Image: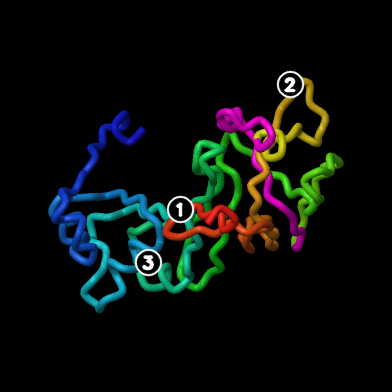
Amino acid sequence: MSIAGGAHLAIGNRSECQDVPSLSLVWAKRGVTLVNAVPTLINIMTSLDSECRLPPSVRLLNLGGEACPPDLVNRLWFPGLRIFNTYGPSETTVTATFQELFPGEPVTIGKPLPLYHALLLPILDSAQKAWSPIQLQEGAEGELAIGGQCLGKGYVQRPALTMEKFIAHPLPSSSGERLYRTGDLVRLDKNLNLIYLGRIDTQVKHRGFRIELGEI
């Protein structure tokens, strides 16, 4: 998408990428304006001292893959830099929700992007089929389910897991639409933004990578 819009991709060599705190200098030299990264990487780059900051050429910072600490936003934000917190699993073609972040404000995963929609489902046993969406109001809490045109078809050669995670849409639909159960517990704030609370299972994330503790 970026290339189609006239941008180019800046790829660092091995030596440049091994020295994480110096990446900011590499980005400044390349004139990088848009960065997509997990918060951990940006935190390592910018937390060593007051001189470790994003180069002024960066105008858009997209964070995702793991929880974003509010302190990171407070430290990095400056007029002219837009910081977005994004959320979305691979099963929904990655980014499904987003929120622009500002210093001193709560960090949430926001609202669905166009072509996506989100529902909150009660925490039920996987064998139960009575999925009924929770009313969208402040304080509502449940498992986040995502639907839309970018939803995957399922897992290759894993029909049981596909059936468990990709469920029929609980609202009447003539198109046979499905939802993906993310396994993420969320709550709605007063602006109906999604607040990520954690997992309903034992899955954890480390630097953006999913880890199933039961498989270790």
Q: Residue at x 41, y 69 (%)?
A: 72
Q: Disc 2 on helix, strand or loop?
A: loop
Q: Is residue 189 above or below residue 167?
A: below
Is residue 41 or residue 46 the one in the foreground?
41
> Is mark 3 in CB contact (under 8 Å) with mark 2?
no
Q: Position of residue 67 (x, y in %)?
A: 50, 62
Name the residue beneath numbered marker 1.
209
Magenta span has 44?
no
Give residue 77's mark.
3
Q: Earlier in the sequence, mark 2 or mark 1?
A: 2
Is residue 72 or residue 165 the one in the foreground?
165
Name the quarter where the N terminus is drawn: top left
Q: Disc 1 on helix, strand or loop?
A: strand
Give residue 175's mark.
2
Q: Is residue 189 above or below residue 50?
A: above
Amino acid type of the residue tagged 3 in the rendering: Trp
Q: Position of residue 135 (x, y in %)?
A: 81, 50
From the viewer's perspective, is the residue at label 3 or at label 2 nearer? 2
**What colour scheme has been applied to the protein in the rendered image?**
rainbow
Q: In terms of image quadrants, where is residue 117? A: top right
Mark-to-mark CA distance, 3 and 2: 44 Å
Q: Position of residue 179 (x, y in %)?
A: 69, 36
Q: Position of residue 168 (x, y in %)?
A: 76, 32
Q: Earlier in the sequence, mark 3 or mark 2?
A: 3
From the viewer's perspective, is the residue at label 2 or at label 1 nearer? 1
The residue range painted magenta reads 139-161
